[in-house]
């Protein structure tokens, strides 16, 4: 007699990248995993052994100008059918990879783009993959080993919030933390629908909140129960959807959150590089910029001012506005 299939549960890891920069998008990414009872402990802890060298806190493993590791995770997941197009196929370009991971389709992502501004964020000129084949094979083996342990990754999605969308949110009274939270909610609803079952979602802490109920957006109005509310961890139960836990430093302590962070870091850097290359083609000798609050980014903003004015690039499509009373995040950030 054939043995019964092991009972499975669905686990989601969610994290943001680019919460505090001056330029470029904020990217919020979620990974959905199908987990057996035996694999549940593996999915809910930090990667160990050799895997920890390739999967963990993206701020430590992926840097501006060196995104090969994040790229490799994104490509490997899409090649295994985890992207928007369910068929398993290796993406042939950076643009194809970005749109395979993005939650929204091409038309929706460009809906707010004036025609003369679109090239700033969507030009594919000069971009290409950098992850070597050896690294791609290693990531493939990592995913195989996780599946053998009962952790199968089944989907990855990112919400892309460009400067224009961030600025529109500020005008609507939504600061970056609220926009981050609402993007997380959208992703959990989307991947919960794909799972077709209740999920357990672990998200990075948003804005140091202890209580989230009054700030929910897409989940507002849904019946829920607060199971725990504190500075380090807040947990909510939504009947029919599952549990959502907001956990401090979860990208360093939860495998699925770490994977979401790695993919999101790549998406953020790839999209910021498009902005940098766009203006480097117009300003001789211009250095690229990370987009964060640093001297190189400040110089980049100043050096491109005349070009942006001549091309009538709206400030809202280039630099983020801070919400009233909101202090900028210093340093590199996530």
Image (tube, rainbow, N blue to C red):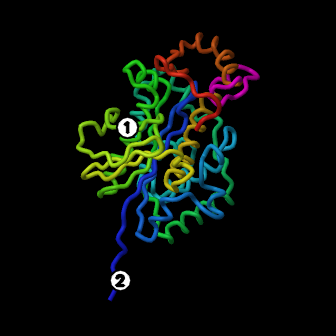
Q: Is residue 1 above or below residue 121?
A: below
Q: Is residue 169 left or right of residue 256?
A: left
Residue situated in front as seen by the camera: 333 or 138: 333
| Main secondary structure of the magenta stretch | loop
Q: Residue furthest right?
A: 285
- Where does residue 197 sit, x and y in percent of width and height? 29, 58
Residue 47 placed where, x, y %?
58, 59
Along the viewing direction, whichever of 282 and 300 lies nearer the viewer: 300
Task: Give the residues drawn in magenta, as a range.
Answer: 277-295
Q: Is residue 241 magenta?
A: no
Q: In the image, is 151 to the left or to the right of 63?
A: left
The residue that mark 1 highlights is 211
Crowd class of label 2 (few under 14; some 14 to 19; many from 20; radius 10 Å): few
Residue nearest the viewer, comparing 200 with 29: 200
Residue drawn at 65 percent across, 48 percent down:
61
The reply to whether dot 2 and dot 1 touch (C-beta < 8 Å) is no
Secondary structure beneath label 1: loop
Q: Which residue is disc 2 drawn over?
A: 3
Q: Is residue 280 magenta?
A: yes
Q: Disc 2 to disc 1, how far (Cα)? A: 44 Å
Please state the horizontal and vertical placement of residue 150, each as a whole percent of the image.
46, 69
């Amino acid at each position: 007699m054939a043995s019964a299939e092991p009972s499975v549960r669905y686990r989601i890891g969610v994290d943001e990248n680019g919460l505090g920069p001056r330029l470029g998008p904020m990217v919020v990414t979620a990974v959905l995993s199908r987990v057996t009872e035996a694999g549940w402990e593996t999915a809910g802890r930090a990667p160990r052994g050799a895997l920890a060298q390739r999967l963990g806190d993206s701020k430590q493993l992926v840097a501006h100008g060196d995104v090969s590791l994040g790229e490799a995770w994104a490509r490997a997941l899409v090649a295994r059918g985890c992207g928007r197009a369910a068929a398993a196929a290796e993406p042939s370009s950076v643009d194809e990879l970005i749109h395979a991971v993005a939650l929204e389709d091409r038309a929706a992502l460009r809906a707010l783009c004036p025609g003369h501004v679109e090239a700033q964020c969507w030009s594919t000129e000069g971009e290409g993959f950098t992850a070597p084949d050896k690294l791609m094979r290693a990531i493939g083996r990592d995913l195989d080993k996780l599946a053998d342990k009962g952790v199968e990754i089944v989907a990855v999605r990112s919400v892309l919030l460009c400067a224009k969308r961030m600025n529109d949110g500020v005008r609507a009274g939504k600061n970056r933390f609220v926009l981050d939270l609402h993007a997380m909610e959208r992703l959990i609803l989307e991947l919960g629908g794909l799972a077709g079952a209740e999920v357990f979602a672990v998200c990075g802490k948003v804005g140091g909140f202890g209580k989230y109920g009054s700030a929910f957006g897409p989940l507002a109005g849904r019946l829920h129960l607060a199971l725990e509310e504190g500075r380090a961890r807040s947990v909510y139960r939504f009947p029919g959807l599952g549990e959502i836990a907001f956990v401090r430093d979860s990208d360093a302590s939860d495998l699925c959150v770490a994977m979401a962070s790695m993919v999101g870091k790549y998406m953020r850097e790839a999209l910021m590089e498009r902005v940098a290359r766009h203006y480097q083609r117009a300003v001789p000798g211009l250095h690229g910029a990370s987009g964060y609050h640093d001297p190189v980014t400040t110089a980049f903003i100043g050096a491109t001012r005349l070009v942006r004015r001549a091309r009538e690039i709206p400030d809202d499509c280039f630099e983020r506005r801070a919400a009233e009373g909101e202090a900028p995040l210093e340093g590199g950030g996530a």
